[in-house]
């Protein structure tokens, strides 16, 4: 079963940075505790201060589904972050298994 790399690009509504960025930190901390999470990092765009990217890696598609079903994802992302964003794009990639 291949691992999954996810790249989520978010743009905050102007003036919401002080609300959004602490929520992103909470999300990173919570996601890193998930059993199927292999990596979860957030980076703010240097040229566009209202934009940031989440780089997420999961052990499987099932682990990604568990992340999206988690209470912290629902509460932080769906209920609190999404209403404060102007754009949200997500790219998902299967990571090929190593060949011997």
Image: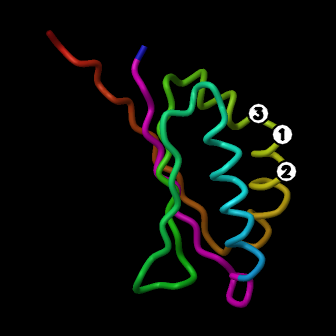
User: What residue appears at the point 40 percent right and 20 percent down from the top-left corner?
Assistant: 2
Question: Which residues fall within the magenta stretch?
Answer: 2-17
Residue 14 versus residue 11 in the image, above or below? below
Asked if residue 61 lies in the magenta stretch, the reply is no
Viewport quadrant of the C terminus = top left
Query: For the residue carrying disc 1, how many other residues have a C-alpha within 10 Å: few (<14), some (14-19), or many (20+)?
Result: few
Q: Mark 3 points at which residue?
A: 69
**Would you call the spot at circle 3 few (<14 residues within 10 Å), some (14-19), or many (20 or more)?**
few
Give the quarter of the figure containing the N terminus: top left
In this rendering, is residue 50 above or below 73? below
Q: Could you give the CA–CA distance between mark 3 and mark 2, rounded to whole angstroms?
A: 10 Å
Query: Element under label 3?
Result: helix
For the point 38% across and 30% down, which residue is it? 94
Please say if the residues under marks 3 and 2 sit with CB atoms less than 8 Å apart.
Answer: no
Q: Quadrant of residue 16?
A: bottom right
The local secondary structure at tag 1 comes to: helix
Residue 71: mark: 1
Q: Which label's residue is closer to the chain start, 3 or 2?
A: 3
Counting from the top left corner in percent of width and height, residue 85 is at 69, 72
Left or right placement of residue 82 versus residue 93 in this view: right
Q: Which mark is residue 75?
A: 2
Q: In this view, does 12 lie above or below 7?
A: below
Q: How many marks?
A: 3
Question: Which of labels 3 and 1 is toward the front?
Answer: 1
Tag 1 near tag 2, CB within 8 Å: yes
What's the CA distance linking mark 3 and mark 1?
7 Å
Name the colour scheme: rainbow
Q: Where is residue 65 in the image (x, y as percent from the top left)?
A: 65, 29
Q: Residue at x 47, y 44 (%)?
A: 6
Residue 11: say if magenta.
yes
Tell me the crowding category of disc 2: few under 14, some 14 to 19, or many 20 or more residues within 10 angstroms, Cα based: few
Q: Residue at x 63, y 52 (%)?
A: 28
């Amino acid at each position: 079963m291949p691992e999954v790399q996810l790249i989520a690009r978010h743009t905050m509504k102007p003036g919401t940075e002080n609300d959004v960025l602490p929520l992103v930190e909470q999300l990173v901390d919570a996601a890193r505790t998930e059993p199927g999470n292999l990596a979860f990092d957030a980076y703010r765009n240097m040229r566009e201060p209202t934009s940031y990217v989440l780089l997420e890696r999961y052990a499987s598609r099932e682990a990604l589904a568990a992340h999206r079903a988690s209470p912290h994802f629902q509460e932080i992302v769906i209920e609190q972050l999404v209403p404060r964003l102007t754009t949200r794009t997500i790219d998902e990639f299967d990571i090929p298994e190593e060949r011997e």
